[in-house]
DNA sequence: TACGCTATGTGACGGTTTGTCACGGATTAG
DNA sequence: CTAATCCGTGACAAACCGTCACATAGCGTA
């Protein structure tokens, strides 16, 4: 019985040691010897493309680390208005809220791998893992920084600038994750998703992309594959 | 020398014990016996109305607890576009970022009292104060919740709904702070500030307020003092 | 491979909602 | 008391985006 339990933890520990996200998320900065503390509190989850992790209104008892894949975070208005709050992927943290129920849903745009933690265990993990604090500070701070950018974008930029900002944001994310091909973008989300993220309609998004293509700032090899030709100019446009 | 230092801490501890924000912010949930750990790491700050706590671009080495007064958090675009990211007051937490420099400025709309902490000490405070985790989780979560609401508002609501949401938000804040007169609002910010918060112009804000008054949802006793007559209806309008 | 469905690009058009400009009155600060 | 700032409101327009429509491309499935 006892050995069984220990083996289980060791197995999970092995999973964590070899995890593609070993150096990001909550586990980053933890020495290998501390990793079991986190592992033993996590549940590995797998979502198929299109599946929903949780719905708006569900009890908010868990938080998640996204290891692989892309998720769409959505809030719906009573009359059907829809706002995509974020696209989250490798290295992102999801579910942090003070409310008892989620005010948004989380859906998989691709197959997704994630770690699930009980909220209660996260709230007190630093006591067992001293190094945890810093990483937790960083993750929440990144979230807040991203939302700050998005607020400024939606509040004060026009359609073309918003689309440019969106593309730059996708590029920045690649760079952050260490890619050296940060101008070759894969957009797993639909035009409607992009529109609802930027506070526009899909037609306006489509036209803005066409406009950027016509002006030579980007190439559209495929609706979901875009390359940035002029990183500088796109950045300048995105800043207004 | 030694006694001097101890007295200083004891004095500060006294300040913290009697603080109006003793039951909110980072100190909430801490027993009186743990309070000195926080106190010894904090610097009390006082700002006069109109003063700036920090500017966009300043080194982000501190975070702040706002004990009293109201602050305006602002991001400026290169061409002068302005987005107010938040109005913060009693019980709010300010300065949480992963960047090395602030991407917004913080200005006092009224006289303000706050506690300043070194970011580095916050990042590792749980190791000394176990109860700190939960409170920190809560503060960052509230921030994220508020920004989520604001995103939905700016992305998907029209002018009248935004102004209604803004007023409801001010009312909710009063309620959260335990006021039983949560329909009597004091708005220390100017119409331009409100406009830049909601992604509108001041004229549109002014007209929306007049419209709400005409429709009997609110009373405007003074430009900066508004009472909500029909809490239900205003809430419904704010939700779309 | 063929079929059907969904997603995307694009045109034309409209119009609603805001922004812009202007000015008088109110409020505040010094 | 005075100047400066803030606020409310009217008239106007017009930009910018949304709506509607349809053709095409892409994708999944059988």
Image: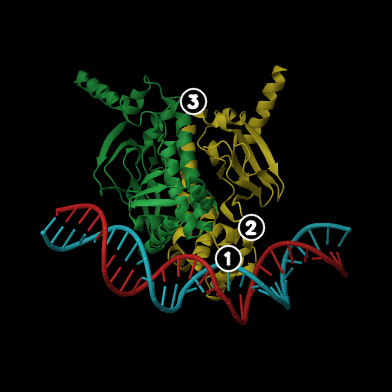
Chain colours: A yellow, B green, C red, D cyan
CB of mark 2 within 8 Å of CB of mark 3? no
| Res. A182 visible in picture | no
Helix, strand, or loop for circle 3? helix
Q: As rendered, which of A230 and C15 lies closer to the eye?
A: C15
- B77 above or below D10? above
Looking at the rendered image, the quarter that the N terminus of chain A falls into is top right
Task: Give the label, 1 or 3, closer to the camera.
Answer: 3
Q: Quadrant of residue A155?
A: bottom left
Q: How crowded is mark 2: few (under 14 residues within 10 Å), some or many (20 or more)?
A: some
The CA span between labels 1 and 2 is 16 Å
Chain letter belonging to callout 3: A
Disc marking residue A189? 2
The CA span between labels 1 and 3 is 46 Å
CB of mark 1 within 8 Å of CB of mark 2? no
Could you say where residue A228 lies in the image, as x and y percent from the top left? 54, 66
Q: Residues within 10 Å of mark 3 (few under 14, many from 20)?
A: some
Q: Earlier in the sequence, mark 1 or mark 2?
A: 2
The CA span between labels 2 and 3 is 39 Å
Q: As rendered, which of B87 and B73 lies closer to the eye?
A: B87
To which residue does mark 3 refer?
A127
Tell me if A213 is positioned left or right of B105 in this view: right
Tell me if C12 is positioned left or right of B117 in this view: right
Task: Give the label, 1 or 2, closer to the camera.
Answer: 2
Q: Quadrant of residue B10?
A: top left
Chain letter belonging to callout 2: A
To which residue does mark 1 refer?
A227
């Amino acid at each position: 019985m006892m050995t069984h339990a220990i083996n289980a933890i060791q197995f999970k520990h092995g999973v964590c040691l070899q995890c593609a996200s070993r150096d990001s998320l909550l586990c980053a900065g933890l020495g290998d010897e501390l990793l079991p503390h986190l592992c033993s509190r996590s549940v590995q989850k797998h979502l198929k493309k299109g599946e929903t992790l949780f719905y708006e209104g569900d009890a908010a008892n868990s938080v998640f680390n996204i290891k692989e894949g892309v998720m769409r975070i959505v809030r719906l208005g009573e009359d059907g208005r829809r706002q995509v709050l974020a696209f989250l992927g490798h290295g992102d943290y999801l579910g942090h809220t003070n409310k008892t129920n989620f005010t948004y849903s989380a859906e998989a745009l691709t197959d997704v791998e994630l770690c699930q933690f009980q909220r209660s265990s996260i709230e007190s993990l630093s006591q067992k893992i001293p190094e945890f604090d810093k990483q937790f500070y960083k993750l929440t701070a990144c979230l807040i920084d991203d939302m700050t950018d998005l607020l400024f974008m939606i509040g004060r930029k026009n359609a073309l600038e918003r689309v440019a900002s969106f593309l730059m944001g996708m590029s920045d994310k690649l760079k952050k994750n260490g890619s050296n091909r940060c101008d070759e973008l894969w957009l797993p989300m639909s035009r409607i998703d992009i529109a609802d993220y930027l506070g526009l309609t899909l037609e306006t998004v489509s036209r803005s992309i066409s406009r950027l293509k016509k002006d030579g700032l980007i190439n559209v090899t495929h609706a979901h594959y875009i390359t940035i030709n002029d990183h500088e100019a796109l950045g300048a446009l995105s800043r207004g």
